[in-house]
Image: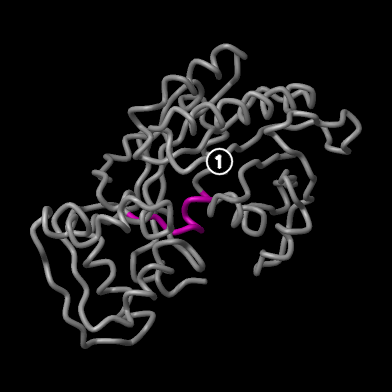
Amino acid sequence: MDILISGLNNYVGRRCTSLMADKDFRLFAITRNRKLFEERMADPIRAQIFEVDLLKGDTDDNIGLPYLDASFYFTQVPALDDMVNVRVELLCLRNFIRLIKRLNCDRLVYVARIMDKRCLQPILDLLEEFKMDYTVVLKNIVVGEDCLLYDIYEQVSGYKMVFYSKQHGGGLFQPIGIHDFIRWLKAILHVPAFHHNVLEIGGGDMISAVDFYRLYRKLKLKLKSQWIITLPNWLFRLIYRRKINDNTETAEFLRLIQVDGIVDNSWRANLPFTFTSLKEILLAK
């Protein structure tokens, strides 16, 4: 199968260029600046990378991409609950759809986050407008080497005291390992029941962000002693209001962990799937 990926600034999109290709998947990817992307990649790149600016939509018909069997589009904005972000996302997605249609492709997997669930209608309307054979995926937090969650956990591991609240760190979510998620994305392409459908996916285990942090420290950092203190939500928000409101990685992390991340993985009725344990995920590369 010839597959095209867009959204290489997204953690999963970036890792796909290394982990998704195999003897059955010939992988292609587009990015605004190929040289910059390749310089930032630590993993070996197993996809052919092409320069395309979806904001401009000025794709050359002779770019060199082959006809495609399917495509994956990873959200290219921080969240879909902001009108400016939505306009940017719709522009990029519209131009991506025009590109893949020129390459004889109608099959599109659009990958967003659980937190985008209430904001999907404009995306669905656009997919219907172009009569795409789509699957929309709403994912829980995907974890693996160099992911945002690990970056934040490593930062706070150096603090003498770590604060959290029920809303920011105490709620349950279902982290899914990057290898599991990419394996699952490849598998859903072949399931008829998933066409023209919205799927929600989380990992096999439910855990709070603070307990996952404890496990991360134990398995990856071999650290034991640290004060981890719970605060009322109002006090946590008062102390960290600047970090919560800033457009930073910390703010993105705090937004992600306060969303109810529990899903029932009802898609398993059509696709048997075995998840990796949290311990194995944390020890994997």
Task: Quickly name the residue at label 1.
Answer: 76
Tell me how the rendering is colored.
one colour
Give the side of residue 108 with respect to residue 228, left or right: right
Pick whichever, 9 or 55, lies toward us: 55
Rendered position, 57 above or below 233: above
Quarter of the figure with residue 117: top left
Q: Position of residue 18 (x, y in %)?
A: 66, 59
Magenta span dominant secondary structure: helix
Give how far across and how far down residue 228 sits, in percent: 17, 75
Which residue, as the protein is rendered here, is positioned at the far left? 232
Q: Which part of the image, by quadrant, shows the N terminus?
A: top right
Left/right placement of residue 88 relative to residue 169 reads right
Q: Is residue 129 magenta?
A: no
As drawn, which residue projects farthest toward the right? 62
Determine whether the residue tagged by mark 1 lies in a helix, strand or loop: loop
Horizontal side, residue 78 vs residue 226: left or right: right
Which image quadrant is residue 176 in?
bottom left
Name which residue type carries label 1.
Answer: Gln
Counting every numbered tag in the picture gives: 1
Category of crowding for the residue at label 1, using alpha-carbon neighbours closer than 10 angstroms: few (below 14), some (14–19), many (at least 20): many
Q: Image height check: is 43 above or below 68?
A: below
| Image point (53%, 54%), residue name | 11
- Specify whether 227 is left or right of 277: left
The residue drawn where x is 25% and y is 49% is: 258
The residue lying at 72 percent from left, 22 percent from top is: 98
Establish if 214 lies above or below 148: below
Residue drawn at (22%, 59%) of the image: 169
Image coords of residue 241 (percent x, y): 25, 55
Task: Residue 59 in the image: state x and y as whole percent.
Answer: 81, 31
| Stretch in magenta | 175-183
The residue lying toward the viewer, choosing from 66 and 190, is 66
